[in-house]
Amino acid sequence: MKRPADVYDLYMSLARSDELKQHGLAYLKETKDLPMAVDVAEEAADRKKKILEILRGHEEDWSNWKWQLKNRVNDTQVLGKIIGLSNLEKKRIDRVSKAYRWAISPYYLSLIGEDYKEDPIFKQSVPNIMELFPGGSLDPMNEAHTSPAPCVTRRYPDRMIINVTNQCAMYCRHCQRRRNIGEIDQHACWEDIHSALDYVEKNREIRDVLVTGGDALMLSNQLLDFILARLQNIPHVEIKRLGTRVPVTLPQRITPEVCDILRHYPPIYINTQFNHPREITPDSKQACDALIGAGAVLGNQAVLLKGINDKPHIMRKLNHDLLKIRVRPYYIFHAKDVKGTKHFRTSISTGLDIMKSMRGYTSGIAIPTYILNAPGGLGKIPLMPNHIMEVSRAKVVLKTWEGQVVEVENEVT
Ligand SMILES: *Cc1c(COP(=O)(O)O)cnc(C)c1O
């Protein structure tokens, strides 16, 4: 027989569960109509066929990353044929391209939906006239003053970046390193890569080296192999990291050959950049599976972008879908004041509201850290909704995810 106290506990638990269920159902309702990659899979297949026709490629070309790279679209006539653009739109893209170049892999292009103007793939890859609006700086992080050796960016005690190339499979319109993208694709020269590796070797406090660019996986297999081998041979380098967007923009780059190279140099951590759930496709999943098969640990660094992912339910869905393909959400970057990208910037409050909508409402492993890069290259600053209301010697006053105020003891008495 149940005691009255048990009955009361059960009653309270059921009432509480129902309250929680309502939060969960609200999310399901909000995300119900978000078009996912699977919903537009048929459209994407049609688009792929059309792109192959226009570029005079064959089915086997599509899966060849070198073909994809060589055939990146950067001509408004060709783009017009593929997605349909007005003359005014073409003229505007051509005007922007005089200031900032653009190029889109045929694969990424195939993901643009029928209603392209509001499409998150379109907005990230096709130039917009707003890029020419005034404001912003080309180097807000002052990276030019944090480079003690060629290709090196160092802002922290124990870790640093080697920038190995300025090339990408697609030039993001929100690129925060625009000034490096320039006019032509350029890998760092041998001498500079050697100097950067020598710098790592000579500084024994460096235990974590991040190879990025541009996109680290734009390097040839040989050069990648060479750099990883040298880092592997430096005893104080504990981990290697790669920065690459190819799982999103050119998953064909993740070949068995490149996986065989990565497999040789554990531990490797790879951070990529999915910004919208629509970018998570069967091809990108396959690329992530292959990288994980090669022993890499995958993370995601999204950028908070106005009109793309600046809504709580979209960001939450993105992080849920990333976990499904075994990519752990790592960062959400606040978009910096980079020249030509103002139309993508959100307020910091928008980012904080998004963070607030996550803690408690979803799994801890689905929650990245929201980061603002301090001006002047002073480093990353985590931004969080405030859970700490008051700290005194005796007590700490805290706020729960639902906004309840609780008091706990501070110093142990
Ligand atoms: C972001 C960054 C790193 C990596 O730092 P984490 O805190 O490990 O994410 C290293 N070097 C530079 C210059 C960076 O900007």
Image (cartoon, helix red, strand yellow):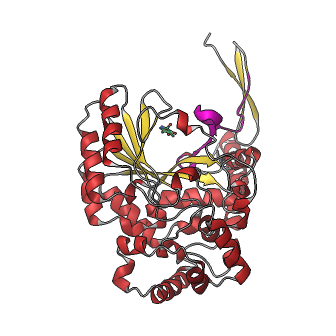
Question: Residue 14, percent across and down?
Answer: 69, 52
For image coordinates 58% across by 78% down, the residue present is 39
Question: Residue 321, percent across and down?
Answer: 53, 61
Q: Closer to the camera, 139 or 240?
A: 139
Question: Residue 221, percent across and down?
Answer: 28, 58
Q: Closer to the camera, 106 or 47?
A: 106
Q: Is residue 371 magenta?
A: yes
For image coordinates 31% across by 27% down, the residue present is 202
Q: Is residue 251 above or below residue 146?
A: below
Question: Residue 314, percent across and down?
Answer: 66, 61
Q: Is residue 378 left or right of residue 215?
A: right
Q: Closer to the camera, 403 or 158?
A: 158
The stretch of residues the image draws in magenta is 365-390
Query: How many discs appear?
Result: 0
Q: Is residue 391 above or below residue 115?
A: above
Quadrant location of the C terminus in the rendered image: top right
For image coordinates 72% across by 34% down, the residue present is 386
Q: Is residue 202 left or right of residue 178?
A: left
For image coordinates 49% across by 56% down, the residue present is 323
